[in-house]
Structures are given as structure tokens and as C-alpha cells.
Image (tube, helix red, strand yellow):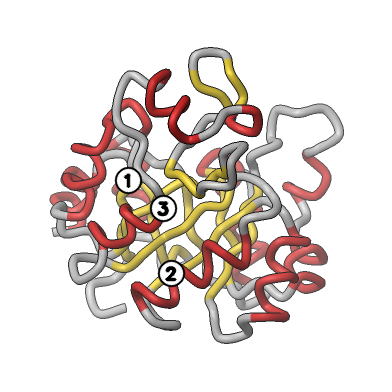
Amino acid sequence: MERGVAISAHRRDSAGLAGLHDAAASGAEYVEIDVRRTSDGALVVHHDAAVAGVPLSRCPYPRLRELAPRPVPLVAEALEIIRGRARGHLDLKERGCEHEAVALALAAFGPDGFVVTTREPASIAQIKRRFPEVTTALSVGRGFWERGAAVRDYAPLRAIRECGADLVAINHRLARVGVLGRCARAGLPAMVWTVNAEPLMSRFLADPRVAVLITDFPGTALRLRG
């Protein structure tokens, strides 16, 4: 990439719709949105699986808008905000929204204008079968603290190869205990998430094994990248 490590601006739920506009205007190469589905089938930008204690899987979109302290955009609305200002970064938080989310992103950005990340190898495989041109990354480290989940996180290469992912998205803690190096030796470009401390930003921005740095603070990362 021309400017070294690319930056993906993560939009936090607490930042609301204004945070999405800020991320799109930040100058980062990517804007990350978290994708979930409500009980009435709407694809929404929301990190957490519940709002005000109500699971999104049991909450229709109109009710979600009432419960949420800030506006919860539809994925289609978010992509329109990002389009023309940055590339898309869709982080799929659950199964069942793969085809619709990718179709929306293809319409907004074209096949080279976005990346899809997910912790689910089956989702990657499903996307690659139907949309082989779409860039995907298997996310590892989300279960870093879960009992029984760390085996694949520490040794993700088999899962990555089997599902057909193009990149690996590594939790920054996992990246520092050898997983980044193992993936690099296998020829896999890496995205590292979610990096918010300046010393870690500087470290990963200078690391040739890192393709994309994901952060809640894109302005800081851009300044450090120079």
C-alpha cells in the first residue's frame, strides 16, 4: 500500500451516528462497521448483541430505535455515508447475514472497495463460494479469553486455509505472542485489532507484516503514521 499500513476507523456504538460520519471523514483508508440482524430482518450497524438488555435477535428495528440511546443506522445507510470517502470494512458479528451484507457492499463499493471480517470460518467459506472476488479475513482472538477457544486462535492457519480467507484479522494481544509471525511466514497479510494505545499503534504501523491497523482513534493513528 502506498502509505504503508492502512488504517481502519472503527465506529463504536457509543459514538452514535455522529461517530460514523467522523470515521468516514477521518482520512482513514477503511471505515469498520459491525453488522447484525434484528428480529424483523433489518441489517443494522451495532457491535453488541443486545440493547437495553434485549437481544437484537428478538428486537424489531423500530423497537431497537426506541431502546437505543443513540441512532442505530441500517447497514445500507452506513455504506452510503462511507462511499466515496473510504473503503468499507464490514465485520459480521453473526451468521445469516453474509449474502445480503456482501451484496449491499458490492453495490456501494464494487468488489475492490471493501473487506469482510468475521470470526466464523463457515461465513468466509459461504462468501467465497458465492462472491469469490470479495476480500475476506478470518478474525482470531475474539475467543482469546474463552475456555476452549484459544486453540484455533493460537494456530489459525488450518482454519484460514480451509475457509479460503485472503487475510487474517488478529487481536493485538494475540499478535504479540507469535501468531502474527506465523501468519506472515505463511504469506498471509494481517489486520490487527483494536489498537488504541499510542505505543502499540507506533509498533504495528512500523511492522511490515501488518497490512491494516484497526483503531477507535484514526486521527491518532494517522498522525503517528505521518
Task: Residue 193 in the image: state x and y as whole percent.
Answer: 47, 46
Q: In the structure shown, which secondary structural element does the residue marked by tag 3 occupy?
A: helix
- In space, the residues marked 3 and 1 are separated at their CA atoms by 28 Å
Between 168 and 163, the residue placed more toward the observer is 163
Mark 1 neighbour density, 10 Å: few (under 14) some (14–19) many (20 or more): many
Between 86 and 137, the residue placed more toward the observer is 86
- In space, the residues marked 3 and 2 are separated at their CA atoms by 9 Å
Q: Quadrant of the C terminus?
A: bottom left
Label 2 belongs to which residue? 105
Task: Residue 109 in the image: state x and y as whole percent.
Answer: 35, 75
Q: Residue at x 75, y 60 (%)?
A: 121
- Taking 184 as reference, is 90 above or below it? above
Dot label at residue 201: 1
Q: Earlier in the sequence, mark 3 or mark 2?
A: 3
Mark 3 neighbour density, 10 Å: few (under 14) some (14–19) many (20 or more): many
Q: Residue at x 43, y 31 (%)?
A: 62
Q: Earlier in the sequence, mark 3 or mark 1?
A: 3
Label 3 belongs to which residue? 75
Task: Residue 135 in the image: state x and y as whole percent.
Answer: 53, 75
Identify which amino acid the numbered label 2 is placed on.
Ala
Identify which amino acid the numbered label 1 is placed on.
Met
Dot label at residue 134: none
Between 223 and 52, the residue placed more toward the observer is 52
Marks 1, 2: nearer the viewer:
2
- In space, the residues marked 1 and 2 are separated at their CA atoms by 28 Å
Q: Earlier in the sequence, mark 1 or mark 2?
A: 2
User: CB under 8 Å between callouts 3 and 1?
Assistant: no
